[in-house]
Amino acid sequence: MKLTPAQFDTYRRDGLVFFPGLFEPHEVAALSAEQVRIFATSSETHLLAASGEFLGTTAMDRVSPLYARLLCDERLLSIAEQLLGPRLYCHQYKIILKQPFGKLSLPWHQDYGPWQHHDGMPEPRAVSIGIYLDEVTEFNGPIVYIPGSHRQGLIEYEVIPVPGTTPIPSLPNATVTKLAAKGGLIAPKGPPGSVTIFDCCLAHASGQNLSPDPRHLIYLSYNPVANAIKKPTRPTHFASQDFTPLVPAPRSALLAA
């Protein structure tokens, strides 16, 4: 899958590009069914709040051939290679759940913040990808981005605890106010199978799911092998130490097994 010149320009200018309905309904159905199976297992990679709310899971490629194949799907990996160059590995892989009427919210942050702070990633050269397993609306906790904020590089942050996961280096309200005054706010909404690809320095956040509808999101990050993490402090299901380059596979391979 090739990015058009206009999509390249959008990514460079805004820090993200959105593909509504990139994955087919039968592919989303298979990924959702496999998600249910994974959640039914007992694993240290699951994310739970102190309240018992199930927040998601990590490192799905270790327990699911389907999710391992998804990492190499050319619709994702080939785009990342166009943006970052070849020889990429997956730094982080997880499913984040926004349950109906759930409590989970994520503060304003840049993905590179925790990757540099916790994992020792040398440079902000990674790309983040979100795959919608449900329709994302303005009501069920969409991710909100500040276009153009990636051009600021790594911004000064404060580390705050977040239930169910490691502390997140987060952006102060005053910083977000200044960034939003310049770039505005956007929240890409769309059907299941939609994909958002964004720069690891793009400021973003998400609020609670206020609706009766779920918002489950597959989230992965590609990073050049040459930019592999140097000082990991977290378990490998939060920050992979397998730097084997991934090889793009045709979309037909996703469900071929």
Image: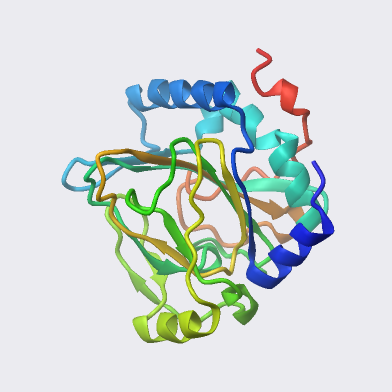
The x and y percentages for residue 30 are 52, 21
Q: Quadrant of the C terminus?
A: top right
> Relative to residue 144, is residue 247 depicted above or below?
above
Tell me how the rendering is colored.
Answer: rainbow
Does residue 83 appear left or right of residue 104 in this picture? right
Residue that appears at 41% across and 63% down: 205
Q: Quadrant of the N terminus?
A: top right
Q: Position of residue 196 (x, y in %)?
A: 58, 51
Q: Is residue 217 left or right of residue 41?
A: right
Which residue reaches farthest top?
A: 257
Indicate whether 225 appears above or below 148.
above
State the residue lying farthest toward the left. Answer: 51
- Please state which of residues 158 and 192 is positioned toward the viewer in this rendering: 192
In the rendered image, is residue 156 in sight? Answer: no
245 is higher (above) or lower (below) than 11: above
> Toward which corner of the image does residue 10 lie, by quadrant?
bottom right
Q: Residue 211: x, y in percent? A: 26, 45
Can residue 220 be spotted in the picture? yes
> Closer to the camera, 116 or 74?
74
Please give the name of the residue rendered at 70% of the width and 35% of the height, measured from the top-left corner. 72
Residue 120 point in image, percent of width and height? 57, 65
Task: Describe residue 9's horizontal placement relative to residue 152 as left or right.
Answer: right
Query: In the figure, 52 relative to 112: above or below?
Result: above
Residue lying at 53% horizontally and 50% vertically, measured from the top left: 239
